[in-house]
Amino acid sequence: MTSTGHGPLTGVRVVELGNFIAAPTAGRILAEFGADVIKVERPRTGDELRSWRLHGGDVSLLFRAMARNKRSITLDLRAERGQDIARRLIAGADVVLENFRTGTLEKWGLGPDDIRAVNPGAVLVRISGFGQTGPYRERPGFGGVAEAFGGVRHLTGYPGLPPVRTGVSLADSVAGLYAVIGALMGLLRRRQGERGETVDVALYEAIYSLMESSVPDYDAFGVTREPTGPTIPGVVPSSTYQCADGKYVVVGGNNNAIFGRLMRLIGRPDLAEDPQLQTNVGRVERAEEIDAAISAWTATADSPRILELLADASVPSGPIYDVRDIVADPHYAARGMHERHPVRIEQDEVREVLFPGIVPKLVEEPGRTRWLGPELGEHTDAVLDELGVPPEEVAELRAEGVI
């Protein structure tokens, strides 16, 4: 296994100092498109993600997916010798990713000034709960906290019931995407001969950026958005409807032309031709009536038939899938959204396992999986050798527990 990449980011070296989801998401995406991502993990324990959702063996499949194409080295960043090795790594890096609590890098002698001293052109991407500035900058903040503080938890669920989680690490994943955008912009800026950029991504701001016109609507009209269950507030019809087999489908008939086709399909030409319902403004006033008409129609047939009729009428619609449905669906397979890779489950058991494909799709230089998330410290010796660390020093570092 080597660091040789393949893709538009081939030749870009990234040092990933983060744990859990946010910074590792950014590192994963960069690695999928050719970057040489060196993941720095704590000796002995490694990234805690290795044991999250552990259903067998000693390394979770979540980590195998999140750390694919990365090289793992162990390094104690709390030790002076570990910090020295980190600075040597950073000296040859193009991008440094981190998602520690604000101030942690500075405490370790790895803050922006320290990084600029050894590598003025490095792009430093920092992800934290509340950002590097402001009165809350030192507060710890995981993704769930950010989703609450950023506003999305208030809108998730049904009116009158406790707010709910979306089911995935939304804040961390979105912050990881912004981190990639920031890293790429920093690399473009460096090409223009500018000093290395520092990218400050706050988890809560990643969520806040998804809140659409919530603040302008509140400021201008005093409107506070509330949870609305399966519907989109102010957009009609767009909701979830139950079919005769008990399954639910999502139907989006809110475009003016689509609304007419949908109403004729469900046997309600009167609604299709009603002057008040020709625009969204009028439909919002009669949302309950419209949703009741659609629900009555979807209840007459099983979900596959309902979806077939909707597709034939060019009405945007789709099933609500669980993971079994996703794995079985031919469109996912045709788009390369499933990859099967051998993975070590137990010490003596290797199993072929399905993993998600790579997004986005590039036609000329597509991303690819070169290997799954590595064993802890699998590449320590190779990376230290690339840095010119002699074998006797490597032995000392290992004896001291620095690596």
Image (spheres, rainbow, N blue to C red):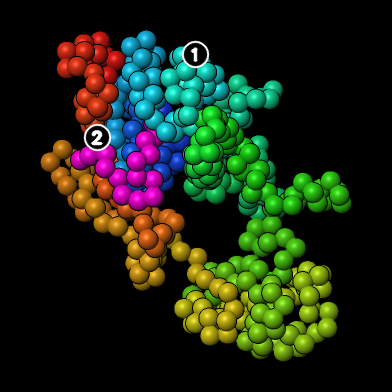
Q: Position of residue 388 (x, y in %)?
A: 24, 21
Relative side of 87 to 298, left or right = left
Please provide the residue range marked out in magenta: 1-15
The quadrant of the rendering that contains the C terminus is: top left
Closer to the camera: disc 1 or disc 2? 1
Residue named by callout 2: 375
Query: Mark 2: which secondary structure?
Result: loop
Query: Mark 1: which secondary structure?
Result: helix
Compared to residue 326, the image places residue 309 above or below, namely below
Relative side of 257 to 321, left or right = right
306 in magenta:
no
Furthest toward the front, the residue is: 193
Say if residue 19 shows up in the picture.
no
How far apart are the two marked residues, 1 and 2, measured between alpha carbons? 28 Å
Residue named by callout 1: 107
Kind of residue at disc 1? Lys
Relative side of 5 to 363, left or right = left
Q: Marks 2 and 1: in contact by CB < 8 Å?
A: no
Kind of residue at disc 2? Glu
Residue at the spot x=30%, y=45% of the render? Answer: 5
